[in-house]
Image (cartoon, rainbow, N blue to C red):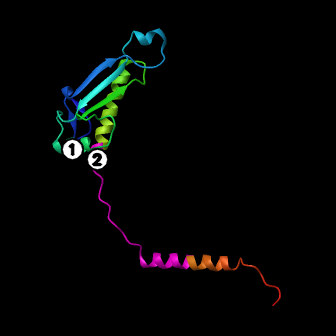
Amino acid sequence: MIFINNNISLNDNDVEISAIRSQGAGGQNVNKVASAIHLRFDINASSLSDTHKQRLLASKDNRINKDGVLIIKAQQYRTQERNRVDALERLRSFIIKATQVNKPRKPTKPSKSAKRKRVDQKTQRGRTKALRGKVDFNQ
């Protein structure tokens, strides 16, 4: 069982994890050791609720292919275990972010005193700027 938060958890068979060879420099060891992790999460076949599935599929993430499979490649660390933990943590944060519901915004109005204060500040600023004009000494 993979726990996402208090309300959401995944079955172990929802996530397919395979070890692959890591890219980039690494000397002779990189050709022998499969330390990177390729995580595949099929959203449609998962044990999540339908609303959560719809939210995940609606997210504009380029890691989700057209079949609805989220693919995460973790190769930041040198060991397979740390890359596995990193991939699962990235999956967890993606699901939390996509299923989070924001509170609807309530439109507010400024109070009368706030409006009055703003206009008074504008007029005072205008007076200050008017005093900066050229001085006529001929009068």
Secondary structure, mark 2, is loop
Amino acid of disc 1: Gln
How many C-alpha atoms fall within 10 Å of the one at disc 1: few (<14), some, or many (≥20)? some
Task: Residue 134 in the image: state x and y as whole percent.
Answer: 75, 79
Identity of the residue drawn at 41% across and 75% down: 111
Residue 6 on the magenta span: no
Q: In this rendering, would 44 be left or right of 139?
A: left
Residue 116 on the magenta span: yes
- Say which quarter of the image contains residue 70: top left
Q: In this rendering, would 73 be left or right of 68?
A: right
> What residue sits right under mark 2 in the picture?
100
Task: Give the vertical position of 25 relative to 99 (above or below).
Answer: above
Task: Give the vertical position of 100 relative to 136 (above or below).
Answer: above
Residue furthest front in the image = 66
Q: In this rendering, would 91 be left or right of 117?
A: left
| Residues drawn in magenta | 98-121
Q: Quadrant of the C terminus?
A: bottom right
How many C-alpha atoms fall within 10 Å of the one at disc 2: few (<14), some, or many (≥20)? few
Query: Disc number at residue 54?
Result: 1
Task: Residue 3 in the image: state x and y as whole percent.
Answer: 25, 34
- Say which quarter of the image contains residue 11: top left
